[in-house]
Image (tube, rainbow, N blue to C red):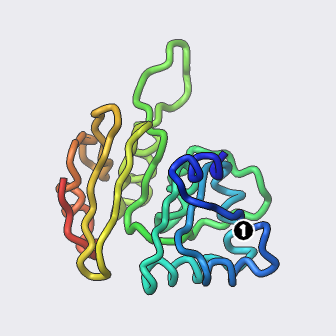
């Protein structure tokens, strides 16, 4: 399905499993696309195949575009602790690519489900922030994205939503707030290495 999507955009893609040497495939890549699936399994495989550092270097040093959605978005953050997926594999590897310096929760949904007696997504993300009070979570709804572009040290971040919906920022001890432009991300952490614009 990822290949169908990229080829519909006129981009020829080759799955990494078709290469004898996955690390060499990253070294030769013009762009990296990581789609959805189970985040735990994906992150485990990235570590097993030794792809974390090569992907980091490709993006940071060579400026190779990285496009990740769903699980691919989760692994672009510092860790996969804010995934919605169940840990289906026995090896639980939490550190991820760290291409974006803040935790993201994709597929964010704040609707109340009638008859559901468990925790809401808001409660789970608030719990994450309570246990990790120095961290923040950006909750992205469906059909929305954060786009990082520009040269190293001069990057910009923009927020896009096909549905015109807002994203939400979760911080410990604060009521979550919604935004439609990327400017509030600058206040999340002093080490975001790029200029932000809406």
- For this orientation, the residue located farthest to the front is 10
Q: Is residue 165 left or right of residue 61?
A: left
Q: Residue sitting at 30 percent across and 79 percent down? A: 151
Residue identifier under label 1: 16
- Tell me if residue 187 can be seen: yes
In-front residue for pair 38/150 = 150
Q: Position of residue 31 (x, y in %)?
A: 53, 69
- Tell me if residue 81 can be seen: no
Pick the quarter of the image with the N terminus. top right
Q: Quadrant of residue 99?
A: bottom left
Q: Position of residue 106 (x, y in %)?
A: 47, 46
In-front residue for pair 22/140 = 22
Secondary element under disc 1, as helix, strand or loop, is: helix
157 over 116 or under it: above or below: below
Q: Residue sitting at 28 percent across and 50 percent down? A: 159
Q: Residue sitting at 22 percent across and 43 percent down? A: 179
155 over 172 or under it: above or below: below
Q: Residue sitting at 50 percent across and 56 percent down? A: 73
């Amino acid at each position: 399905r990822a290949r169908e999507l990229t080829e519909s955009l006129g981009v020829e893609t080759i799955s990494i499993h078709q290469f004898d040497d996955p690390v060499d495939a990253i070294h030769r890549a013009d762009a990296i696309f990581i789609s959805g699936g189970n985040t735990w399994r994906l992150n485990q495989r990235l570590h097993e195949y030794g792809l974390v550092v090569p992907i980091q270097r490709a993006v940071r040093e060579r400026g190779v575009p990285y496009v990740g959605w769903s699980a691919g978005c989760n692994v672009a953050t510092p860790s996969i602790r804010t995934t919605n997926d169940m840990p289906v594999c026995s090896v639980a590897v939490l550190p991820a690519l760290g291409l974006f310096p803040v935790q993201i929760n994709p597929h964010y949904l704040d609707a109340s489900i009638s008859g559901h007696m468990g925790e809401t997504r808001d409660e789970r993300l608030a719990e994450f922030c309570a246990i990790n009070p120095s961290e923040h979570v950006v909750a992205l709804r469906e059909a929305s994205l954060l786009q990082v572009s520009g040269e190293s040290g001069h990057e910009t971040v923009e927020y896009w939503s096909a549905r015109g919906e807002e994203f939400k920022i979760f911080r410990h001890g604060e009521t979550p707030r919604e935004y439609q432009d990327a400017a509030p991300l600058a206040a999340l952490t002093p080490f975001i290495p790029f200029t932000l614009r809406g």
